[in-house]
Image (spheres, grey):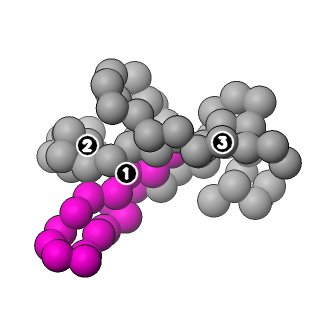
Amino acid sequence: MDYHIVKISRNKKQYLDLLLLGDEQEIMIDRYLERGDLFVLEDNGIKAVCVVTKEGPKICELKNIAVTPSAQRQGYG
């Protein structure tokens, strides 16, 4: 595996279809997506995404994690 994890700063909504796999309510995704950090795992294409928010000093929360259906059960999640 030669994968890369990339932090996405702009156009985060372009990953909405994948984020909806981890959280089925778009309104909830909208609440944390802009204030959170979006990371994309790439390995010959996008395999997974996650959103992490800062909730306080030394406290982060994993709000969403989703693996593309074709990459599920391959160790990416």
How many residues crowd mark 3 within 10 Å: few (<14), some (14–19), many (20+)?
few
In the picture provided, is 69 more to the left or to the right than 2?
left
Query: Where is mark 2, residue-wise?
Result: 33
Distance in Å between CA atoms under marks 3 and 2: 21 Å
Residue under circle 1?
51
User: Quarter-wise, where is residue 7 in the image?
Assistant: top left
Q: Residue furthest right?
A: 1
Q: Residue at x 75, y 60 (%)?
A: 75
The spot of residue 69 in percent (x, y) is 67, 42
Q: Residue furthest bottom?
A: 58
Residue range of the region highlighted in magenta in the rendering: 49-64
Q: Residue at x 18, y 46 (%)?
A: 35
Q: Do labels 3 and 2 touch, CB within 8 Å?
A: no
Q: Is residue 19 visible?
A: no
**Upstream in sequence: badge 1 or badge 2:** 2
Please name the residue that numbered disc 3 is placed on: 4
Residue 43 part of the magenta segment? no
Quick one: label 1, few (<14), some, or many (20+) residues within 10 Å?
A: many
Q: Is residue 33 visible?
A: yes
Residue 50's x, y, as percent? 45, 51
Q: Viewed as shown, does residue 20 lie left or right of 53?
A: right
| Along the viewing direction, whichever of 17 and 62 lies nearer the viewer | 62
> Gap between marks 1 and 2, in whole Å?
7 Å
Q: Quick one: SS at disc 1?
A: strand
In the picture, the quarter occupied by the C terminus is bottom right
Tell me which residue sits at (32%, 47%) in the image: 37
Q: Position of residue 10 (x, y in %)?
A: 31, 25
Q: Earlier in the sequence, mark 3 or mark 2?
A: 3
| Secondary-structure class at tag 3 | strand
Indicate left or right for 49 with 3 as reference: left
